[in-house]
Amino acid sequence: MSAIWHPFTQHGLGEPIPLVTHAEGAALFTADGRRIIDGISSWWVTTHGHGHPRIVAAIAAQAQRLDQIIFAGWTHEPAETLAAGLRAIIPEPLTRVFFSDSGSTSVEVALKMALGFWANRGAPRQRILVLEHSYHGDTIGAMSVGARGVFNQAYAPLLFDVGTIPFPMAGGEQATLDALEAACRAQPAAFIVEPLVLGAGGMLIYPAWVLTEMHAICARHGVLFIADEVMTAWGRTGTLLACEQAGVVPDILCLSKGLTGGAMPLAVTMAREEIYAAHLSTDRARMFFHSSSYTANPIACAAANANLAIWREEPVLAQIADLAARQAGHLAALAALPGVTGARAIGTITALDIAGNAQGYLSALWPQLLAFFRERDLLIRPLGNTVYVMPPYCIDEGDLALVYAGIGAAIEMAQG
Ligand SMILES: *Cc1c(COP(=O)(O)O)cnc(C)c1O
């Protein structure tokens, strides 16, 4: 009996927990000899596929050279190369790169930068605006700016109060923009948003023009605009950053998940020069008070540098466009099935909702779906009744067809 307490797992239900021994491309291999197709990029991180040779080689070489070094007051070549590499591909106004080690911490850092900015300018602001159904991570600060529900009810008294802007449902976009405009008049510190698609909230997609307008409203009112691209970046939505599709450059940008191609934990929060400048002083009380032990770990940075080299030298965007086109065909076939609603897609992500009486996070259908996919050697983890596909970009047509055939069978099972 394992001593491990798994994340987001109800051990009392006794669901089997497969032991994975190795992985390659879009395939995972288990100790009991099964080959599992990774339909969700191992929870949205594995962009180019498991064990990409260039990333693996970079990790091995760096591990032999320099494993770890304090990052307060010290630096190293992989971090310098990564910061320069990010500056070269991320919009130019985002001049500063702050390292951390997960999406949640990149969000905490972004929030602290925003509050530090206002405090150091002598005009303190604390209120944060968020979009309804958002997810930004599981630490207390990140949960505070995310949707409230059963998954954070026990901690609710510790979560800080935020201003929630309604999600821009089709036809309701103007209501979202009006609510944001009204909330911005009260001079909040920042608005944090997942660009174009809300991931954990149910793969909820909204149009690029709404993102453009939301950014314009914040800019007009001097409210800092934080883009949480932890899931959406690195080609997930069809472009390097989702913000690109809206012509938006945020004031603060959070990146993690695909930053290392999904091989190592690493995150960055990038900021405009004014935000850095607000902390720049000879006064130590104005420095940015944040660190974690593994900030800019050299091995993780080396993996990220290999990811950037892949983006520079390999036809990643063409591979993404090809995957998106192939998925569109599969999705259209499923969308025609009885019991399917809300078929939607953006970039390499597709999603649909399966009709059922209990919707939402504790949907009765969810454990059945999870078991159904596991028994068919598919790693697919629905969000309530929402089934989505977010594969590694290297997935071949045979495996992709198996993923969609599995979902088709699950839809049929749910109706019967
Ligand atoms: C996954 C995710 C996070 C949290 O990242 P972790 O690395 O799991 O802490 C934050 N924001 C978004 C949009 C995410 O999808």
Image: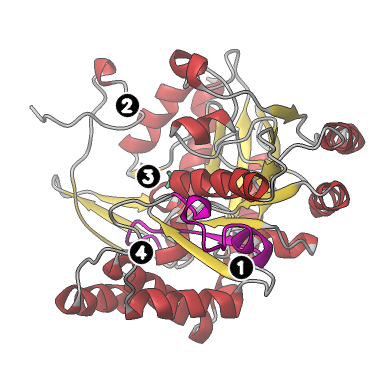
Comparing 246 with 350, the one in front is 246
Residue 164, above or below 351: above
- Residue 290: x percent and y percent? 43, 50
State the CA–CA distance, disc 2 to disc 1.
32 Å
| Residue hosting label 3 | 378
Q: In the structure shown, which secondary structural element does the residue marked by tag 1 occupy? A: loop
Residue 15 seen in this snapshot? yes
**Is residue 200 placed above or below 43 in the rendered structure?**
above
Residue under label 1, please give it. 240
Instruction: Please state which of the two labelled residues, at mark 3 or mark 2, is closer to the viewer.
Output: 2
Horizontal and vertical percent for residue 67? 19, 69
Considering only order in the chain, which callout, 3 or 4, is on the residue closer to the N terminus? Answer: 4
Residue 357 numbered tag: none
Question: Residue drawn at (26%, 32%), measured in percent from left and top?
Answer: 6
Pick whichever of labels 2 and 1 is earlier in the sequence.
2
The residue drawn where x is 80% and y is 34% is: 169
Any mark on residue 296, and which? Answer: 4
